[in-house]
Amino acid sequence: MVATSLTIDLNLNPFSTTHDDTHVKEAGSYDDDDDHSFEKEVDDHSVWDLSRKSNENKKLKEMLIDIWDKYNSLTTHVNKLIQDKEELESSPKKRKFDETVQQSLWKRPREELPISGIKRVYVKVDPCDKTLVVKDGYQWRKYGQKVTRDNPSPRAYYKCSFAPVCPVKKKVQRSMDDDSLLVATYEGEHNHRSPNEEATYALANGREISTSERWFDSPKLDEVLVEQMASYLCKDQNFTSQLAAAITSKISDIDLFKVC
DNA sequence: CGGCTTTGACCTGCGC
DNA sequence: GCGCAGGTCAAAGCCG
């Protein structure tokens, strides 16, 4: 597993960074009778500061994209590991049973299944939560629910909201062995970006996503994205310590201005 | 009012 | 051909 770490120079305080020092000194050495020169210098400083922040903003956006890519690849990797582990732990008899079920599920012999067309994803959920919802970034429309013979838990059938343009279907059913595990089976490949990827893409291009450009216009999307990013960043001690330092520095500077 | 979920009915494939 | 089981349809109801 690859450990991910961030080194972020937030530069939240425009007067505290090393390359700002000379500028602050110059600004502080003006005579009172040179008002115009001082104003011009303040304007220059604002423009320069704006430009610098704009560059930092751009860098942060690039980092956000990178983080999101890493998050996606890690999720895929974890799912694969869980799947491998389950296969190893299951007895030969059970494995044979699973294959029989898998074949009957899709009404096609296993060897005829497209290798990348069908994939299973295991999602840990609260056992008390009886809803068959797997949050995967895409929007789904439920079109059926059925209790199957081999599992007392009902199976939910979903189509991608962009059907018939997008042919992807998914089935969600609680695992027989583990009540807190949902098994999502995907059929087909999305022929569009996920709403999360769409948001990240738009962010990277430095523009808002217009309603017509969004694959779907859900206010929950931003919320989910922000939560995921916040959760990811909070796990990085380097980031949190630098953030704390930057905030402390900013607060002390504000206090300093008040005194002046 | 539009979009989504629910749920019973119907369709389809497979084994006997 | 029949019965069974999984998969899909579509009308009704719900909700924001």
Image (tube, coloured by chain):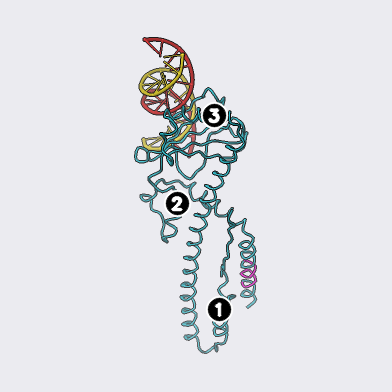
Chain colours: A cyan, B yellow, C red
Q: CA distance from mark 3 to mark 2?
A: 38 Å
Tell me the element at label 3.
helix
Q: Quadrant of the C terminus of chain A?
A: bottom right
- Looking at the rendered structure, the secondary structure element under dot 1 is helix
Marks 3, 2: nearer the viewer: 3
**As shown in the figure, which amino acid type bears the numbered disc 2?**
Glu
For residue A197, the mark is 2
Q: Which residues are magenta?
A: A247-253
Q: Quadrant of residue A205?
A: bottom left
The subunit carrying tag 1 is A
The Cα atoms of the two marked residues, 2 and 1, are separated by 36 Å
Q: Nearer the viewer, mark 2 or mark 1?
A: 2
Q: Secondary structure at mark 2?
A: helix
**Mark 1 lies on residue:** A20
Tell me whether circle 3 and circle 1 mark residues in contact (CB < 8 Å). Answer: no
Chain where mark 3 sits? A
Task: Find residue A181 and report its horizontal and vertical position in percent.
Answer: 59, 36
Task: Tell me where residue C12 sits by quadrant.
Answer: top left
Residue sitting at x 61%, y 75%: A257
Task: Say above or below: A102 vs A208.
Answer: above
Residue A165: quadrant of the picture: top left
To which residue does mark 3 refer?
A96
* Few, some or many residues within 10 Å of mark 1 (<14, 14–19, 20+): few
Residue at mark 3 shares a chain with residue at mark 1: yes
Magenta stretch, main secondary structure, is helix
A15 lies above or below C16: below
The one of A101 and A24 positioned closer to us in this rendering = A101
